[in-house]
């Protein structure tokens, strides 16, 4: 094992991070290579700086005119130059401030500085790299974003264990969650992955459910279990009902227990409507961790980023930073939220008078809602709709996911009428 990795492991020894790192996580380190030497030169090389692999002219990175004309107002450093491995420092500070502003429950809990990843996907992937070994169990509700399988099972060879998302009464299944964790606690370490607002269920926990989830984590930790709890906050902020818990559960877990390592994966993708800019962040926290521990973890994470995507998109980071500093940004974002909430309310209104074979699952947040198709073949409904020029997603041949965030309010009644008609047609076909 590299000496630098050993030193980081020594710093993390005795902490939850040290106990839950994967084999790769233990080996990971940030080398004193080109990036580190360039950083030293940036401070000291006052005559010639011949370190980094970028072309310079008159002390500035070269920016091709044809590119510059497309992005007036962006200097070469703000657009085409490389960014630091962990992301643009000002953006990271600003994102941290945003996390604290949006989650007052964090109070003065310590946490790491957000590290930039290439979208949330890359953030989740990095956590898989650092914390999941073959056969490790990852607990999550039975409705989840399908890409988790590719990352955590196909790639990391972990094993996803699910529990029913909803009780028969339509609440989050806290007891199912507890039972799944209890059943798989024997390894002494568990990863839990919670995605609220959820894709595909369009659900975020109520305040009471949030309390209950946090209580389960606390109990398990008190009982000696080390837990990496990953919060996929892709759709953060899109809450449509007053009883929904309006913060990230990360805020509740950041200072919960020495054995609970809370990992927040969030980003500009869905929350700031900048899908293709590929801007995600990882922030971690646990009770008792100090800056020394956060720094050591950041070096391991940066090593893993360096080994995979090297660093993030500079133009995108500058654009996000400028957007967050734009005085009109909050009001513009609010207008989009209002529109999303109107779509949600329109869908709820349509569903309130529906009486047919599909069962709409509880929905109070996010971009989506899903139908449980019961005995009906969800894939057949999807294909039937496709023939009519309508795209939806079938999941596990049981659920039909409708992204109401993608459809304008005036079109929603026609869309849902087609979905209901399709279900009736497939029901009719299946009884023949
Ligand atoms: C729950 C969830 N997490 C993460 C992502 C991925 O986000 P990104 O595009 O930033 O990789 C998605 C995208 O659909 C998602 O639904």
Image: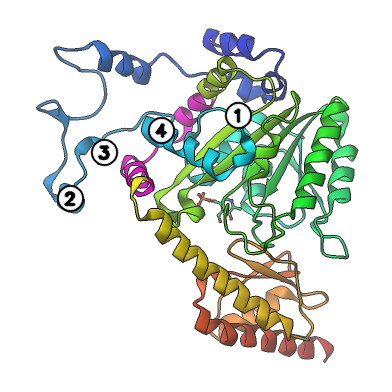
Secondary structure category for the residue under label 1: loop
Q: Is residue 273 left or right of residue 251?
A: left
Q: CA distance from mark 1 to mark 2?
A: 40 Å
Q: Main secondary structure of the magenta part?
A: helix
Residue at 84% x, 50% y is: 174
First reached walking from the N terminus: tag 1 or tag 2: 2
User: Residue 108: which numbered mark, if any?
Assistant: 1
Q: CA distance from mark 4 to mark 3?
A: 12 Å
What range is drawn magenta here? 301-324
Q: Are marks 1 and 4 in contact (CB under 8 Å)?
A: no
- Nearer the camera: disc 3 or disc 1: 1
- Nearer the camera: disc 1 or disc 2: 1
Which quadrant would residue 13 be assigned to in this image?
top right
Residue at 79% x, 51% y is: 209
Give yes or no for residue 307 being in the magenta stretch. Answer: yes
Give yes or no for residue 138 being in the magenta stretch. Answer: no
Viewer can see residue 88: no
According to the picture, the residue beneath numbered tag 4 turns out to be 87
Q: Is residue 361 left or right of residue 123?
A: right
- Nearer the camera: disc 1 or disc 4: 1
User: Residue 78: which numbered mark, if any?
Assistant: 3
Q: Quadrant of the N terminus?
A: top right
First reached walking from the N terminus: tag 3 or tag 1: 3
């Amino acid at each position: 094992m590299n000496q630098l990795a050993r030193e980081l492991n020594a710093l993390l020894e005795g902490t939850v991070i040290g106990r839950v790192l994967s084999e790769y996580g233990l080996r990971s380190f940030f080398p004193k290579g080109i990036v580190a030497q360039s950083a030293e030169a940036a401070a000291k090389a006052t005559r010639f700086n011949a370190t980094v692999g970028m072309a310079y002219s008159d002390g500035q990175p070269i920016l091709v005119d044809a590119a510059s004309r497309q992005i007036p107002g962006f200097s070469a450093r703000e657009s085409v130059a490389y960014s630091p491995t962990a992301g643009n420092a000002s953006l990271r500070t600003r994102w941290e401030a945003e996390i604290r502003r949006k989650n007052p429950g964090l109070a003065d809990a310590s946490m790491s500085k957000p590290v930039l990843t290439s979208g949330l996907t890359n953030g989740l992937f990095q956590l898989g790299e650092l914390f999941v070994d073959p056969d490790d169990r990852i607990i999550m509700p039975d409705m989840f974003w399908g890409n988790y399988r590719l990352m955590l099972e196909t790639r990391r060879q972990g094993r996803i264990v699910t529990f029913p998302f909803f009780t028969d009464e339509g609440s989050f299944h806290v007891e199912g969650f507890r039972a799944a964790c209890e059943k798989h606690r024997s390894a002494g370490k568990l990863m839990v992955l919670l995605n609220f607002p959820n894709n595909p269920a369009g659900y975020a926990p109520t305040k009471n459910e949030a309390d209950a989830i946090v209580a389960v984590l606390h109990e398990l930790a008190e009982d000696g279990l080390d837990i990496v709890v990953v919060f996929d906050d892709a759709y953060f902020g899109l809450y449509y009902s007053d009883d929904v818990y309006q913060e990230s559960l990360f805020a509740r877990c950041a200072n919960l227990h020495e054995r609970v390592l809370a990992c927040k994966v969030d980003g500009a993708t869905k929350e700031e409507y900048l899908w293709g800019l590929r801007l995600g962040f990882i922030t971690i926290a646990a009770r008792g961790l100090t800056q020394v521990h956060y720094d050591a973890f950041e070096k391991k994470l940066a090593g893993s980023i360096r080994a995979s995507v090297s660093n993030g998109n500079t133009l995108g980071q500058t654009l996000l930073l400028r957007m967050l500093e734009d005085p009109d940004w909050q009001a513009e974002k609010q207008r989009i939220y209002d529109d999303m909430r109107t779509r949600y309310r329109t869908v709820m209104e349509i569903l309130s008078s529906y009486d047919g074979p599909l069962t709409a699952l509880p929905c109070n947040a996010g971009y989506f809602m899903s139908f449980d198709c019961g005995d009906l073949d969800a894939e057949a409904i999807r294909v039937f709709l496709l023939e009519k020029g309508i795209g939806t997603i079938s999941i596990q041949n049981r659920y039909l996911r409708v992204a109401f965030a993608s459809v304008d309010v005036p079109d929603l009644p026609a869309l849902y009428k087609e979905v209901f008609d399709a279900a009736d047609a497939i029901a009719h076909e299946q009884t023949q």
